[in-house]
Image: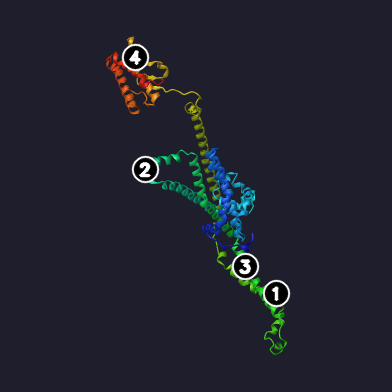
């Protein structure tokens, strides 16, 4: 690192002004930086593109690209760091060094540090300073005390802008569709294209994300590097060191010029006659002057030192207020110590009470879980494979299960009706029809539903033909059960003949 060749003005800046410095460095070498970006990211983009095209876990394609993307940040950081100290922006050399840079930054590629909230200010520590292990952690701790909040804010702002560009590209894709096409089935076709998430939709989604990152990622890296450089300028006084070096160079240049002029005067040819007629007025000066000297007297150095210490850069002061106890009397000290001891004993007592209460609460919760295990433990068990429990319907006239119904319900009803057990026949027809509506058509009934509640539920949740048959069945059953009115053989025969058509699903 050669501060003599630095290409920007190093001075203490505010944090956001430091981020702007990094953005200006990106703009200065944007051509080289974007050449390195495309040279590194396009091969990386090829991997998720192939995953989507050949359907190799296409849902992970975008995550794979996002995880590998910091590989492209390393060459960008290398270019702007070298340009800061006067080197050329050689993007080809940065691309050739990309594998070694990626290995140096493996902490942000292969570990959970990939989710670092301020990665743009953390990468320079590993890549530019070469710090690892305890040294990197100590260095990062020093920088994070000043930069962590601004680095995190920079990352949040970057992510919001990326998503804004991504969503804007999606909206623009809809806006570019001709209006006549959208008036018909076009809008539904476009929505299906994105919602179905087929191969081409995944490719378009990945390319939109890549375009948004291409527009913003180099500037994000540059802003983080600007924060890093500004922090080091403040911590290590780079601006003062540069000022001292330039002052020494100016002094040395002035001395060299004076020495060269003196040598020219001493050794240049002259006319003896002119010298005899008109002797130099300051000849005595050369006799007493010992010649060119490369040292400075204290009178030359002191004014420069005073100007440096009078600079505003060294004028920051901080006022610290501390409380110091006045030396108490022995009696007061004894009383205060007794009072402090009493307070400590009271605090320990209440702490003990709180601790015991928490342990008792924990024990009570454990006991409650044990006592109620029969209720919640079955919920944690996985359902038995290959077994599907059939519903149990609870009616006002009793519960209905698959075992309580015959395989041939219409035939059983006709046989009971012919044998004279008419109430049992219509009860079976009613219960079988309710159960078929619940299991076959997903009708939801309240617990202990009456005939009227069943009619209301079936009417709301089935079609007209099924609800009409259900009402006729309930009417026949209610007339016989509650009014002792025989509906007649013809009505029962009609209901049994139509039952397979409306509710003939397996019961």
Q: Earlier in the sequence, mark 2 or mark 3?
A: 2
**Label pair 2/3, CB-CB below 8 angstroms:** no
Q: Label 3, secondary structure: give it.
A: helix
Q: Residues within 10 Å of mark 4 (few under 14, many from 20)?
A: many
Name the foreground residue: 492 vs 389.
492
Q: Earlier in the sequence, mark 1 or mark 2?
A: 2
Q: Residues within 10 Å of mark 1 (few under 14, many from 20)?
A: few
Q: Earlier in the sequence, mark 3 or mark 1?
A: 3
Q: Residue furthest bottom?
A: 277
As drawn, the label of residue 183 is 2
**Label pair 3/1, CB-CB below 8 angstroms:** no
Q: Position of residue 27 (x, y in %)?
A: 53, 58
Q: Residues within 10 Å of mark 3 (few under 14, many from 20)?
A: few
Q: Report the residue marked by disc 1.
A: 293
Q: Label 1, secondary structure: give it.
A: loop
**Mark 2 or 4: the one toward you:** 2
Q: Report the residue marked by disc 4.
A: 425
Q: Position of residue 346 (x, y in %)?
A: 52, 43
Q: Report the residue marked by disc 3.
A: 246
Does residue 196 appear anywhere in the picture?
yes
Compute the Cα span from label 4 to label 3.
112 Å
Compute the Cα span from label 1 to label 2.
91 Å
Residue 277 location, quadrant: bottom right
**Mark 1 or 2: the one toward you:** 2
Name the foreground residue: 39 vs 145.
39
Q: Position of residue 137 (x, y in %)?
A: 61, 50
**Mark 2 or 3: the one toward you:** 2
Q: Earlier in the sequence, mark 2 or mark 4?
A: 2
> Which residue is found at the position 33% from the left and 28% from the top?
460
């Amino acid at each position: 690192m050669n501060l003599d060749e630095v290409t920007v003005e190093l001075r203490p800046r505010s944090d956001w002004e430091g981020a702007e410095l990094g953005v200006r460095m990106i703009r200065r070498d944007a051509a080289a930086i974007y050449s390195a970006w495309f040279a590194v990211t396009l091969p990386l983009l090829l991997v998720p593109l192939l995953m989507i095209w050949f359907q190799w876990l296409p849902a992970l394609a975008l995550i794979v690209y996002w995880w590998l993307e910091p590989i492209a940040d390393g060459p960008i950081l290398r270019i702007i760091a070298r340009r800061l100290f006067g080197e050329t922006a050689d993007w080809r050399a940065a691309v050739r060094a990309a594998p070694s840079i990626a290995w140096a930054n493996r902490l942000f590629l292969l570990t959970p540090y990939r989710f670092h909230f301020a990665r743009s200010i953390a990468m320079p520590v590993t890549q530019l300073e070469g710090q690892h292990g305890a040294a990197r952690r100590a260095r990062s701790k020093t920088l994070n005390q000043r930069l962590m909040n601004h680095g995190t804010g920079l990352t949040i702002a970057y992510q919001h802008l990326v998503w804004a560009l991504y969503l804007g590209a999606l909206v623009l894709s809809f806006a570019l569709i001709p209006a006549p096409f959208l008036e018909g089935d076009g809008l539904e076709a476009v929505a299906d294209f994105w919602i179905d998430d087929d191969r081409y939709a995944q490719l378009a989604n990945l390319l939109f994300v890549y375009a948004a990152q291409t527009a913003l990622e180099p500037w994000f890296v540059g802003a983080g590097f600007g924060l890093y450089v500004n922090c080091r300028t403040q911590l290590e006084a780079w601006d003062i060191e540069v000022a001292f070096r330039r002052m020494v160079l100016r002094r040395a240049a002035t001395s060299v010029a004076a020495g060269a002029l003196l040598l020219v005067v001493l050794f240049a040819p002259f006319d003896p006659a002119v010298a005899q007629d008109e002797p130099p007025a300051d000849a005595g000066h050369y006799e007493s002057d010992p010649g060119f000297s490369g040292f400075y007297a204290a009178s030359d150095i002191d004014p420069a030192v005073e100007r440096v210490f009078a600079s505003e850069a060294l004028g920051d002061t901080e006022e610290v207020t501390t409380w110091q106890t006045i030396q108490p009397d022995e009696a007061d000290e004894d009383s205060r110590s007794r009072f402090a001891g009493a307070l400590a004993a009271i605090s320990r007592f209440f702490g003990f009470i709180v601790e015991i209460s928490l342990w008792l609460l924990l024990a009570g919760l454990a006991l409650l879980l044990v006592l109620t295990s029969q209720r919640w433990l079955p919920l944690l068990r996985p359902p038995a494979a290959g077994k599907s429990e059939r519903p149990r319907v609870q009616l006002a006239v009793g519960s209905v299960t698959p075992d309580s119904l015959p395989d041939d319900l219409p035939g059983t009803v006709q046989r009971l009706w012919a044998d004279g057990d008419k109430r049992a026949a219509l009860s079976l027809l009613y219960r079988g029809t309710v159960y078929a509506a619940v299991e076959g058509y997903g009708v939801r009934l309240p617990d202990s539903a009456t005939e009227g509640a069943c009619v209301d539920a079936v009417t709301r949740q089935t079609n007209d033909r099924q609800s009409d048959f259900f009402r006729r069945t309930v009417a026949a059953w209610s007339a016989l059960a509650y009014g002792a009115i025989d509906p007649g053989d013809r009505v029962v025969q009609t209901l049994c003949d139509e039952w397979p058509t409306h509710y003939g699903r397996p019961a």
